[in-house]
Structure formats: C-alpha cells, structure tokens
Image: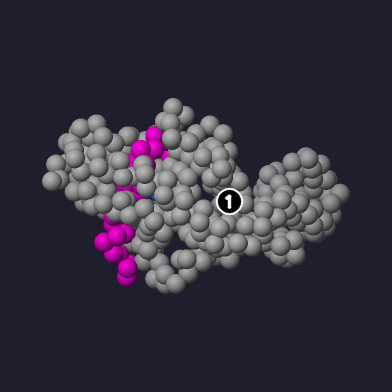
Amino acid sequence: MSQTKGRVFSGARPTGRQHLGNYLGAIRNYVAMQDSYECIYCIVDLHALTTLENTGMLREWTYEMALDWLAAGMDPDRGTIIFVQSHVPQVTELHTILSMVTPLGWLTRLPTFKEKVRQQPDNVNYGLVGYPVLMASDIALYKADTVPVGVDQLPHLEFTREIVRRFNAHFGDILIEPQAKHTEFTKVLGTDGQQKMSKSLNNHIEIAATPDEITQRVMGMVTDPARRYRNDPGHPEVCNVYSLHTFFSPGDYERIEHECRSAEIGCVQCKRLFAQHLSDYFAPFRERRAALAENPDHVWDLLTDGARRASAIASETIAQVKDAVGLP
Ligand code: TRP
C-alpha cells in the first residue's frame, strides 16, 4: 500500500445489525472516504469486552455488522481493509508498551471514563481504564494519519495524539500523530423523537429491516408534538420524521415540508411516504446483503483476508517500536 493518499483508520464496536443512526453517523462516511483515502476499518471486539457482561453475542454481532458494512459499500475490492481487531493480536503488544508511557491521571480524568464509571459502577475494570490506550494502539499500529471522529470521540483522539507525541519524544519518530477529520456526524433521534437512536433503547430502525418491518417501525414514530389534529399546521423543523425525509426522500422533501406546514398532508400520510422512501433507498442494499448472507464462510474469509493485510502493516510497526524501545 502506498501512503501518498493519506490513511484513514476507524473502529466501531460490534453491535450487530446497524441502524439508521449508525448509517448516517458513520457508515456512509466510511464509504465516501474510500474515494480519497486508503481506508482501514476495524470491528473492535476487544474494546467491546470492556463493557459487555455477556460476551456470547460477540461472534454473531461481528458477523451481522460485517454484512451491513460490506453490503453498504465498504469494499475490499477497492483496497479497503476490513477486519476484526482481535485477529491482529499485535495491537495488544502495542497496548502494553504504550501503557508504560501513559500517566494514569490522564486516563481517569477523561470524560468518557467518568461517564462509564457512572454507567457501570460495579464493573470498573482495568481494561475500561485502558480503553483509550487500546484505541491509541489501533490508530498508531496502522500508522493512520486521519481518523474520522464525532464529538464524543474527540477526547480519545486528543489523548492518542498526546501519547504518540510522548512516545516519539522518548524513543524517536516512530509513530504518526493522527489528525481528526471532522466529518458531519449526524445525530439521529430514535423513533421516540426524544433520545438518540440506539439498539439498547429499542427506538431504532435497522438498515437491513424488511419493507414490512420498516413500515411497522415508521408508523410508530413520534412526529411534531404540537400537531394534535389532522388539520393543525405542522412544524417540520421540530419533526424527527421530517428531518429523516431530508436524507432519504431527496426528490420529495421540499414538497413534504410545504404540505405539512399547510396541513395538506397529515402525519400518517407523511410517515407512509417516509416508509416507502426508506424501503426504496435500502432496496439495493438489502439485495447485496442477502447475496452475501448466502455464504457466511465467504464473509468470514473476507475478514480473515483483511486481518492478513492489516497484520502485514502491524508487524512492521511493532518491529520498529520494539527496536526503538530497546527490547532485546
Ligand atoms: N472508541 C470508539 C467508539 O467507541 C471505537 C474505536 C476503537 C475507534 N478504536 C478506534 C474509533 C480507532 C476510531 C479509531 O466509538
């Protein structure tokens, strides 16, 4: 692989079938970045271990997520490396070495860590504290110079940059200090119109949902709360269904906005339209996904091949790091 184009690395925890929030927030950016970067995308199963009590779903969730990624157009045939974090164990070596240049206070002060402590006070494990060191190891191991991040991950990227600078200051210019790429990470609300779309809140719509499942979920969506009667004028600017129309109904949303404001269409009709557009939008995706799912072994083979290619880069970095540190 040449490094002239700039190298992107991003990771996501295996959460199974992806939803509209994952799609608009991450996947479509991952696909688009393939046009201008060499891309490495990782399913970070080791990171998932820091918060999961029940690990029995990891294999299935990894597989389902890989299916969604591949069917959405993250494409090994375009040079993109897609792999599972634990398949390239060099990352744990780098994690150990980087942990020696990481002041503990930096980790415990991170807002992401404090949030986790609030969320799981009975499971503040050592791995959880080291979560950002593992993430820094991901990025540094593959010598990525660009990392797409949303605001929630910015502290982790800043941390990565500091660790890389610290390592390089001690041991020489080995690792690359990555830049954050502020892609527009759209925040998608769930079907409740209140909270962020998430699988754990069950307010999500899967991108692999069948047309019937889509209709069922969409018809249950909360719309403009101030529009109580069919003849009340609507307020698209506060309606979650409308904001999703702007993504998935490109030829239609201006008309819908107008007809909502003037009460020419009601919420039920608006949602029917949305369900139809959403279903049409993901129809080619569903077809590709079904074709891939016919042969699960092939999907695992693609991931194995991704790990093989990732490993070639990782081995080189680890050799340089060990040498620089002075390990015999
Ligand atoms: N911490 C990220 C998240 O929770 C996942 C992640 C792990 C990641 N390693 C990464 C993201 C490397 C970007 C780059 O979403």
Left or right placement of residue 174 versus residue 50 in this view: left
Q: Identify the magenta region.
A: 121-147
Magenta region includes residue 131: yes
Quadrant in the picture for residue 123: bottom left
At 53% from the left and 45% from the top, the residue drawn is 76
Q: Quadrant of residue 168?
A: top left
Left or right of 34? Residue 107 is: left
At numbered mark 1, what does the secondary structure look like: helix, strand or loop?
helix
Residue depicted at 29% across the width and 60% down the height: 127
How is colour applied across the structure in the image?
A: one colour
Q: Which residue is mark 1?
A: 70
Q: Is residue 159 magenta?
A: no
What kind of residue is marked 1?
A: Leu
Q: Nearer the viewer, residue 244 or 213?
A: 213
Q: Position of residue 166 (x, y in %)?
A: 22, 37
Residue closest to the eye, 267 or 5: 5
Residue 205, position in %: x, y? 64, 59
Q: Residue drawn at (34%, 45%), measured in percent from left and top?
A: 314
